Image: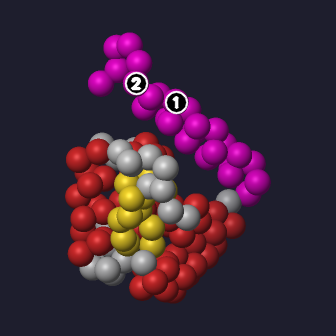
Amino acid sequence: MCDGLSYQRLSLLQALHCGGPAIMRDLGTQLGLSPRNMTAIVDGLEATGLVARRPHPTDRRATLVELSPSGAMEAERDLGPRLDAIAALFAELTPAERAQFSAILARLTEAMQPGEDRC
């Protein structure tokens, strides 16, 4: 938790800030969240006025989530410095170390995909 925002909530704000309004189902897939968890996170952010739900313009079954004006201001204010801090950490690694780290993350991500004999 940073400033009252969990990692999932911060990730959702970042996804909306960078990608614009999106369907809840697609956001859940992108962030690796179940529909139930996605709904809870959007409920919490909506209650604090950071996001808003609206009907999809062409798909009656889908709901779009978008940053509210205050959510966009918070994203601008908070995400930039946090991303800069993360970039500074990675700047400490050599190019070879960054490549190795990236390869390990790719392998772990692949290992987490659903498949036979996996938890």
Q: Which residues are magenta?
A: 94-119
Please say whether residue 106 is one of the residues in the magenta stretch. yes
Measured Cα–Cα span from mark 2 to mark 1: 9 Å
- State the mark number for residue 114: 2
Q: Is residue 85 visible?
A: no
Q: Quadrant of the C terminus?
A: top left
Residue furthest to the right: 95
Q: Vertically, is 17 above or below 32?
A: below
| Residue 55 x %, y % | 39, 59
Q: The N terminus lies in which quarter of the figure?
A: bottom left
Q: Are marks 2 and 1 in contact (CB under 8 Å)?
A: no
Q: Residue at x 38, y 64 (%)?
A: 54
Q: Position of residue 69 (x, y in %)?
A: 46, 83
Q: Secondary structure at mark 1?
A: helix
Kindly identify the amino acid type of the residue bearing the numbered disc 1. Glu
Label 1 crowd (10 A; few <14 / some 14-19 / many >=20): few
Q: Main secondary structure of the magenta part?
A: helix
Query: Residue under circle 1?
Result: 110
Q: Residue at x 54, y 69 (%)?
A: 17
For image coordinates 34% across by 14% down, the residue present is 117
- Front of the two marks 2 and 1: 2
57 left or right, relative to 32 = right
Local SS, label 2 = loop
Residue in the foreground of this view, choosing between 103 and 80: 80
**Which x, y percent locates residue 95?**
76, 54
Mark 2 residue crowding within 10 angstroms, few (<14) / some (14–19) / many (20+): few
> Compared with residue 18, is residue 68 higher up or lower down, i.e. above or below?
below
- Residue 33 position in % (x across, y down): 34, 46
Identify the amino acid type marked 2.
Pro
| Residue depicted at x 61% and y 76% | 84
Instruction: Specify whether 11 is left or right of 53.
Output: right
Give the residue furthest to the top: 116
